[in-house]
Image: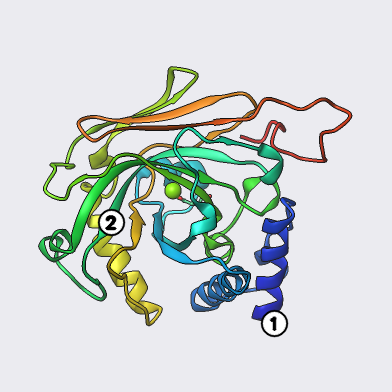
Amino acid sequence: MLKQLAIKLDQAAASASSVEQLSLSTELALTDAYQVQKLSIEQWLSRGEQLVGYKMGFTSRAKMRQMGVDDLILGRLTDAMIIEPKQAINLDNYVHPRAEPEIAFKLKAPLSGLITVEQALAAVEAVAPAIEVIDSRYRNFKFSLTDVIADNCSSTGFIVGPWRPADTDISKLNMQLLVDGKVVAEDDSSAILDHPLNSLVEAARCISDAGEELKAGQIILAGAATAAIALAPGQAISVNVETLGSCSFSTQPARSQATSQANTYTSAEA
Ligand code: OOG
Ligand code: MG
């Protein structure tokens, strides 16, 4: 049964189409939801994608408020989700994508279980500004906690900017999300669980619940500092993080009516 749910979500992601929330017809326990996530990622890996890291979600009040979920969640990142800096993404490949400002960690040592902030920092090789592109596979971007976990926490893409040394102070850095040069969302890095490193501590705890560990070389996204913004065709999106630097990507211009496919990203659901 869990496998069928995983296949359903995987097909929705692969075809950029939305499905009804699982929770409307199936009661899933938290562990079942993570199992569905794992089974759906196995589908992706079986097609040749590589696991490159993990992401934390709902680590800021702004995100919890926007989505109405106030528990931390962990999702999986694959190499197919990597968006190259300055790349122009085609919105036809997404259902209703949004972008959010993040901080990324690259690990040089494994982490798992209950650890301190100091232990987390000791395993960090580098930190970078990042943008996450999220895309719920659920209609209207609406979900329960277990729904979003099963849907791999809306993971679909991410862009990482220049890496900086691990000892860079990231405790209180201004983070701005810009669309076409205008700031559309802003907060500072302490909005992420008081300090983004706390998110890495939580990621180590969550992954050990799944019987896995964070590994050297993997990338961990700490979670967005602000609410996410809906993407539209022909936009330039960037994130500036004070002292860390910036990264950016764009969305391809709208195609003509005749060639555009059924797609809901322009609907007024943001
Ligand atoms: C779930 C993913 C949350 C974050 O940074 O908080 C997340 C969603 O909002 O669809 O990635
Ligand atoms: Mg995120």
Q: Is residue 148 left or right of residue 95?
A: left
Task: Estimate the spatial distance between the alpha carbons at disc 2 and disc 1, rounded to whole Å.
Answer: 35 Å
Q: Position of residue 4 (x, y in %)?
A: 71, 77
Choose the circle earlier in sequence order: 2 or 1.
1
Which of these two is toward me, 139 or 117? 117
Numbered label tally: 2
User: Judging from the image, what secondary structure is the residue with disc 1 in?
Assistant: loop
Amino acid type shown at disc 1: Met
Amino acid type shown at disc 2: Lys
Q: Is residue 160 left or right of residue 145?
A: left
In the figure, residue 198 lies in which quadrant?
bottom left
Q: Residue at x 21, y 69 (%)?
A: 109
Q: Pointers 2 and 1 in contact (CB under 8 A)?
A: no
Give the residue pinned by disc 2: 106
Which of these two is toward me, 48 or 101? 48
> Height in image: 28 above or below 16?
below
The label shown at residue 1 is: 1
Q: Position of residue 191 (x, y in %)?
A: 28, 41
Query: Which corner quadrant holds the N terminus?
Result: bottom right
What sort of colour scheme is used for the picture?
Answer: rainbow
Q: Residue at x 69, y 37 (%)?
A: 265
> Height in image: 124 above or below 112?
above
